[in-house]
Amino acid sequence: MAKATVIGGGFGGMAAALRLRARGHHVTLLDRCKRLGGRAQVFERGGYRHDAGPTVITAPFLFDELFELFGKQRQDYLNFIPLDIWYRFHFHDGREFDYGGTVEDTLSAIHAFEPDDCEGYERLLDHSKRIFDIGFTELADQPFHSVGTMLKQVPNLARLGCYRTVWQLVSKYLKSEPMRRAFSIHPLLVGGNPFETTCIYSLIHYLERKWGIYFAEGGTGAIVDALTKLMLESGIEIRTGVTVESIATQGRRASGIKLEDGDSFGTDMVVSNSDPLHLYSKMIKPAALGWSMKAKRMRMQQSMGLYVLYFGTARQYPEVAHHTIWLGERFKDLIKEIFHGKTLPEDFSLYLHRPTATDASFAPEGHDSFYVLAPVPNMQADIDWEVEGPRLRDRIVRALSETILPGLEQCIRSDFFMTPQDFATDYLSSKGSGFSVSPIFSQSAWFRFHNRSEALQNLYLVGAGTHPGAGVPGVLCSAKVMDRITPIA
């Protein structure tokens, strides 16, 4: 039985550990946090519970597959609750648009908002499906280790117009500026700029439509607990609170693990669920990296950073949906400053998560639990978060109090926040990026860090920074790619 070591217990790492175990390997999973989940941590403050990471669950069959590997049913471990309203968009002029449900539901909502965009939406959905059929169905779990694999897809990508950005594709079909903004936000969910990200990522729109959007009963942390239980039942060794300092090598082969506490051990295979930029700059000796890998590492652009504010309220807001996209007055210029600016913008757009809309256990009776996520520049910008963190907190609370959460300034409780600096410290995310490598075309598929390491034999990559990319479906699919290219024990 070959020994496989997985570094990092995010969804990609947990899925990889389970797939390796199902193939007969002895598997050890290491994580620096006290609890598995990677960014999907759970915080408890003042009686309020908060999912720290991903909250939108799509493509639930990808979770089902992990349980089925061992002849088990996900429903016996975990319940997914379908949401009727997937996202409520709140625009700066006070208008709102509810997106979700059936196609007819969405068309009805569009008709009430901008009747001229109904036909365009149907055409956009059809285009998204055609991209999905190639980009997700055929390619999401396929390895891109050969440039030839990439070249074979050029005719398909050209035929689908994937030289366009997401914004350009959406604008081709929709006339209303608010509707264009609403249906261009999907790249931001995986760390991309809709004005720069190839419209390949428009497949996310059809992915949501095909399977719907769900919330895990008990929160995203309940998914982590269910997968942890499955791993333990399957004989996977789990070690938390340990940080990998480096990967030992024998020639061009990964041969062992050294921990920061001085412990070390040999292994036949390493799967890294850590940020590839951290992996290749901190965990592997420079001598083991060829010049091409060093150049690739240096040219890679990170995604934007995230500022996340968590809080409870001493009252409930039943009129607020489970997921709200709160859009400020500026859009294109704001996004440009987030991705390329060197200072913190004075305005913002927000993603608001209210889990108590679906699961009352997240807060004391009569209270609500929230988190608010604001895309911000990563640590390449000159931002002193010791100063700007509290200021941004106050600005966000004031803006929400004046709009969808009236009275928030008086009823907010137990609030705290995370900044890009925390992402760098807690998750070893390069430059504090929220989603690892940015999903622009020149950093996608073959151009991205490969699932089979270009630097070392017996080293494999899963997670947001490798193919196919960030987001829960993406990192789960990265483990399926790894499953196709690793040997059976």
Image (cartoon, grey):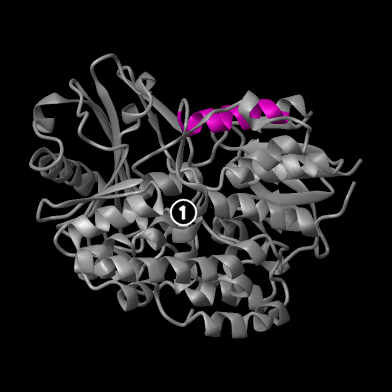
Can residue 34 be seen from the camera position used here? no
Q: In the rendered view, would you say 169 is above or below 159? A: above
Query: Where residue 208 appears, x then y in whole percent?
Result: 46, 52
Residue at 42% over, 40% down: 55
Name the foreground residue: 11 vs 388. 11
Mark 1, Cα crowd under 10 Å, few <14 / some 14-19 / many 20+, is: some
Can residue 200 be seen from the camera position used here? yes
- Answer left or right for 402 relative to 279: left
Q: Is residue 111 magenta?
A: no
Residue at 69% over, 80% down: 147
Q: In the rendered view, would you say 484 is above or below 370? A: below
Magenta segment main secondary structure: helix
Q: Quadrant of the N terminus?
A: top right
Residue at 23% over, 73% down: 175
Query: Where residue 357 appears, x then y in whole percent?
Result: 31, 30
Kind of residue indicated by mark 1? Arg
Name the foreground residue: 417 vs 413. 413
Name the foreground residue: 240 vs 10. 10
Query: Where residue 297 appears, x then y in whole percent?
Result: 56, 70
- Answer left or right for 269 relative to 454: right
Residue at 59% over, 74% down: 447
Q: Which residue is mark 1?
A: 209
- Answer left or right for 370 relative to 177: right
What is the quadrant of residue 22 in the picture?
top right
Query: How many badges with numbers are in the image?
Result: 1
**Mark 1: which secondary structure?**
helix
State the residue lying farthest toward the top.
365
Q: Which residues are magenta?
A: 219-231
Query: Where residue 433 appears, x then y in whole percent?
Result: 42, 56
